[in-house]
Image (cartoon, rainbow, N blue to C red):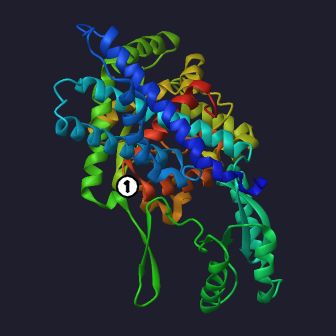
Amino acid sequence: MHRYHTYRLQPLLLIVCDWLMIVCAELLAYHLRRDWLPNAASTFHIPDVYLYLIVPTIFICFLQTVNTKFRTFPLWKMAESVFRAVGFALLTITMLMYLGNVAGVVSRLYVAMTGFFAFFFVLGARALLRHYLNSRRLLAAPVLFVGAEAAVEAFRKALGAHGGYGMTPVGAWYTDRVNAQELAPAIAASTAETVIVTATGLPADDQARLIGRIQPLVESVVFVPDLPGAPVANIEVQGIFEGRHMFLRFQNNLAHRHNRIIKRAFDLVLCLLGLVVVVPVCAIIAIAVRLDSKGPAIFVHHRIGQGGRTFPCYKFRTMIPDAEAVLKDYLARHPEARKEWEKDYKLKDDPRVTRLGAFLRKTSLDELPQVFNVLKGDMSLVGPRPIVRGEIPKYGEYFRDFCIVPPGITGMWQASGRSDTTYEERVQMDTWYVRNWSVWIDITYLCKTFWIVLARKGAY
């Protein structure tokens, strides 16, 4: 097989990977149900043909519907697609159980546990496999770029920064340097079966003719519209066949009331479940803060919330009591620190922070009381970074996006390096989150924040 066409092995590799994970999920659920759980039935038995063939085949049939995008899906989108596939597989299995009159024999707890483990095993294995393949540029499909040189190189750079997304460039054809008659020989010589058309600098009619000329020569044409910064996570492409028109629909999920209700319910359920752990930990930290330095354990700072309203944001006190006076004096004596403060509203070496406060900030434990802000509705578990009134001008026109939802305890910026990011990057991250929200994005960033906090990356 030609080295550029080894990517055709990818579907087979993914099927083997999924099969292994589903069988592992079945075996774990089987032994939990039969051997380890209280009142387990030692007579419970699943025939091998179901364990190794029938059930995995049902799961794989549904998982195959998203196989072609597994190299390009972000983690949250992959989680959503795997969850749906597993859900439909479980529904199919349950229907077959009742149609085959075996529902009374097969444990429903076993079926539920199989689905639960299958979701996490398949998602984890796919994420690791994607990272391995992309980081080593393995099984990548050959692609040829067509477009203006600057646009082609910008897209190639973005593609390379993400491991190629399962694609490897085998050539480029610049519309601002090469005559259109040379396109067909260039495609034939490149061995590419996919052509990526970026901004060409051509009029719309010429672009349509260019794509029409390319399409018969390859398996697929990918068109990259010149819309940098557009909210692409919830985009739909539709067409009017009779008029030969294409249009893009950009969804604003949080504009729908039912999505805001889902987000609020998600926050409440997780917070109420977490209170069992949060309340004792908060009590211990509050005592430690009082013993470490004089002053109250809880610091109330007024921040800007949903709708531009001010709300009291709770945090464990991490600074000395006369913090404002110390900051004013420190900035007056250190011009470099003043520039840092005016830029980010943060100081890497903050003289106001106590010994315990430095630890609480590094581990983000100082933000635990904000769980009660979430219960009150002032904040969300995931959302834009809560800001002070002086930061509003830095958001400019994007402040309208900020005001749509409550600010979050965590968010895209915390899960992307926290204080290591620039202020402009944080604004763009907040805007992207608001315009592209889904419950899967919230789940993903909660998990990513957990690992970032454990690594103590970017917090001060």
In the image, 33 versus 260, the foreground residue is 33
Compare residues 122 and 177 and report the one nearer the observer: 122
Residue 381 visible in rendering: no
Q: Position of residue 182 (x, y in %)?
A: 81, 84
Q: Quadrant of residue 370?
A: top left
Residue 133 seen in render? yes
Q: Residue at position x 25%, y 24% from top?
A: 109
**Residue in the image at 52% along x and 28% along y:** 364
Could you say which quadrant of the image residue 211 lies in? Answer: bottom right
Q: Residue at x 55, y 44 (%)?
A: 413
Under circle 1, the secondary element is helix
Q: Position of residue 321 (x, y in %)?
A: 51, 24
Residue 184 higher or lower than 18, as above or below = below
| Residue 398 coordinates in the image, percent (x, y) | 49, 62
Determine whether 108 is above or below 157 in the image: above
User: Is 386 or 249 nearer to us in this picture?
Assistant: 249
To which residue does mark 1 refer?
308
Using a 10 Å C-alpha cutoff, classify the residue at mark 1 as few (fewer than 14 neighbours), some (14 to 19) or many (20 or more). Answer: some
Q: Is residue 220 left or right of residue 78?
A: right
